[in-house]
Amino acid sequence: MNYNIYMDDKDYLKCEYIKNKTKYSELKNIQIGGSINNIVIHISGASGSGKTTLGNKLKEKFGNKIVVKDLDILRDEHSDEAYDKTKPWSIDEVKYQKYIDNYVTKQNKPLILVGLNDNPRGTKKIYYNVHAQHRYYIDLDGNIINKQKCLRLLNDIKDDKNAMNDLMNNNKAFIKGMTFGINHECNLKDTIKENNKRKIYYNKQKYKFMKRDDIYNEVSKIIKKYITK
């Protein structure tokens, strides 16, 4: 969590966004540029539900026998390559879908993708096709998700040099930034509302709604079966 995001919220709202005219159903039908010869597993869930933690746990267990990729990092890598300073925070949904396609097809080990496969940088919600044969959504109570999001914010702030500098030397700016961050990350009503919306989408896409430990156990069995062939 970047403290500067909270400090620059006005500029953030002024950024130009591309208008996503392509619906997810159209993105889904783009022909992938290659064949998928490995297992692809996608673990999604609300922000703060523990997706990254679960991916790290699986990586610790299987080491270099698998590839674990955070979709936030994948999107940032694409943005760095396709950066257009005239359109900050924008993303071309078709180009990014092809970027996902290329990344998936070049893997020769079981691939575990963690994170939301949506586009937060557009005026409309777009969900990308990650070509997963096994799809999971971490089923967690809204109150717990909200608590974890809020704790993550507080933990990140104490390690943020900019935030700590403002705390000591520009307290007014620190209070402003923290107020925005808390309203954004610790708002129970908004957390539950957003999670319920995502559940509708992922249910339509036939994701399995399971507890984190159950997902870990089931994914472990899938990987073991694949790597012992």
Image (cartoon, grey):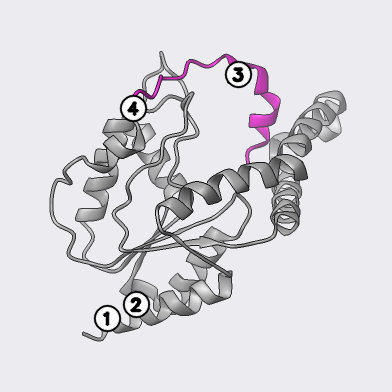
Residue range in magenta is 1-21
Q: Residues within 10 Å of mark 3 (few under 14, many from 20)?
A: few
| Label 4 – label 1 distance at C-alpha | 36 Å
Q: Residues within 10 Å of mark 2 (few under 14, many from 20)?
A: many
Q: At 33% across and 70% down in the image, what residue appears?
A: 66
Kindly identify which numbered label has been placed on residue 166: none
Name the spot of residue 105 as percent of width and height, x first.
20, 54
| Label 4 – label 3 distance at C-alpha | 19 Å
Task: Kindly state the secondary structure of the residue where label 3 is placed.
Answer: helix
Kind of residue sitting beneath label 4: Asp
Q: Nearer the viewer, residue 21 or 160?
A: 21
Task: Kindly state the secondary structure of the residue where label 1 is placed.
Answer: helix
Instruction: Looking at the image, tell me whether mark 3 or mark 2 is earlier in sequence order.
Output: 3
Residue position for label 3 = 13
Q: Is residue 42 left or right of residue 132?
A: right
Kindly identify which numbered label has been placed on residue 227: 1
Q: At 14% across and 56% down in the image, what residue appears?
A: 35
In the rendered view of the protein, which quadrant contains the N terminus? top right
Question: Is 10 inside the magenta-drawn segment?
Answer: yes
Residue position for label 4 = 92
Instruction: Looking at the image, tell me whether mark 2 or mark 4 is earlier in sequence order.
Output: 4
Q: Residues within 10 Å of mark 4 (few under 14, many from 20)?
A: some
Kindly identify which numbered label has been placed on residue 223: 2
Kind of residue sitting beneath label 2: Ile
Q: At 47% across and 54% down in the image, what residue appears?
A: 203
Q: Are marks 1 and 2 in contact (CB under 8 Å)?
A: yes
Q: Residues within 10 Å of mark 1 (few under 14, many from 20)?
A: few
